[in-house]
Amino acid sequence: MLEDVVRLVQDHAGPDVVVKFAHMELAAPTISDGFAACVAAGATDVIAHPYMLSPGRHAMADIPRLVGQAAASHPGVSYRVTEPLGVHPLMAEMVLHRCGLSTATTRQPV
C-alpha cells in the first residue's frame, strides 16, 4: 500500500519532485536507503514525511533521529521532517467517502 501512496504522491507532485519511500524498521528500504535514493535521484533538499496519523514517539522522535543520521552521510543536502498526517479537513472527506456518504449527505437531518 505504501508503494501505491508513493505513486499517487509522485503523480500529483510531478516529474520535478523526487518521491521515495522508506520504512523505519522491519522492512526495506530503510530510512537511510530512502534518503540515499533521493540524493541519487538528484535531490538536494529531502523532506521526510512520517506517513502516520498521530504524533506518537515514532513520528516525533524516532523518525527525525533516523533521518538526521541518514543526512549525516550526505553533507550539503538539507533536510526536514514534517508532522504526521494528523487532523486535516480533507481527512473528513476521505472518511465520509469510505463510508459511502458525501459531505452534503451528512449535513441532512437524521
Image: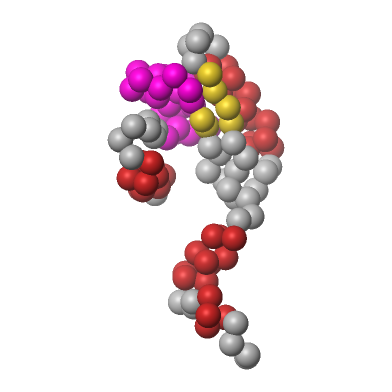
Classify 73 as above or below 63: above
Left or right of 57 in this view: 34: left
Tell me, yes or no, whether the highlighted magenta stretch contains residue 37: yes
Compared with residue 33, is residue 50 higher up or lower down, i.e. above or below? below
Q: Which residues are magenta?
A: 21-46
Nearest the eye: 108 or 28: 108
Classify residue 92 by image quadrant: bottom right
Question: In the figure, residue 83 lies in which quadrant?
Answer: top right
Q: Position of residue 85 (x, y in %)?
A: 58, 48
One can see residue 33 in this view? no
Residue at position x 38%, y 41% from top? 13
49, above or below 71, in the image: below
Asked if residue 43 is among those painted magenta in the image, a careful observer would answer yes
Residue 78 point in image, percent of width and height: 53, 19
Q: Residue at x 30, y 35 (%)?
A: 15
Q: Position of residue 31 (x, y in %)?
A: 49, 26
Extreme residue toward the left, this view? 15
Judging depth in this view, the residue of 55 and 94 nearest the camera is 94
Q: Please tell me which residue is depicted at 63% across the width and 36% down the height of the picture.
A: 58
